[in-house]
Image (spheres, rainbow, N blue to C red):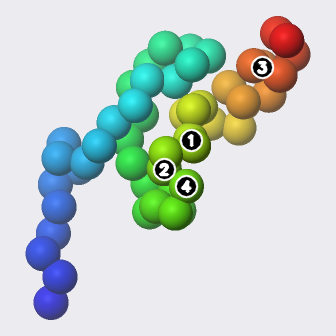
């Protein structure tokens, strides 16, 4: 059985749009190095600012 990891022990990043911290998610496992935004909304807002 796999060892459980506490939510507080997961890696975190700061969103480039809203400057709030967000934690690693399993669906981001393959592309974690390239994730820059906490949500689709922040990603969309960042594209509008360009």
Instruction: In this rendered view, identify the residue nearer to me: 42 or 28.
Output: 28
Which residue does the numbered mark 2 point to in the structure image? 32
Which residue does the numbered mark 3 point to in the structure image? 45
Residues at discs 4 and 2 in contact (Cβ within 8 Å): yes
- The N terminus: image quadrant: bottom left
Q: Report, in whole angstroms, how far the alpha carbon at label 3 lies from the one at label 1.
A: 15 Å
User: Residue 6: horizontal and vertical position, in percent?
Assistant: 16, 54
Q: Earlier in the sequence, mark 3 or mark 1?
A: 1
- Left or right for 45, reference 27: right
Which residue does the numbered mark 1 point to in the structure image? 35
Residues at discs 3 and 1 in contact (Cβ within 8 Å): no
- Left or right for 42, reference 36: right
Give the mark toward the camera: 3 or 1.
1
- Tell me the SS state at disc 1: loop
- Tell me the SS state at disc 3: helix
- Tell me the SS state at disc 4: helix
- Tell me the SS state at disc 2: helix
The answer to which image quadrant residue 34 occupies is top right
User: Residue 10: horizontal and vertical position, in percent?
Assistant: 25, 48
Residues at discs 2 and 1 in contact (Cβ within 8 Å): yes
User: Residue 50: horizontal and vertical position, in percent?
Assistant: 85, 12
């Amino acid at each position: 059985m796999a060892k459980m990891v506490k939510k507080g022990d997961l890696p975190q990043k700061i969103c480039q749009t809203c400057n709030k911290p967000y934690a690693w998610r399993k669906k981001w496992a393959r592309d974690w190095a390239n994730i820059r935004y906490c949500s689709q909304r922040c990603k969309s807002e960042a594209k509008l600012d360009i």
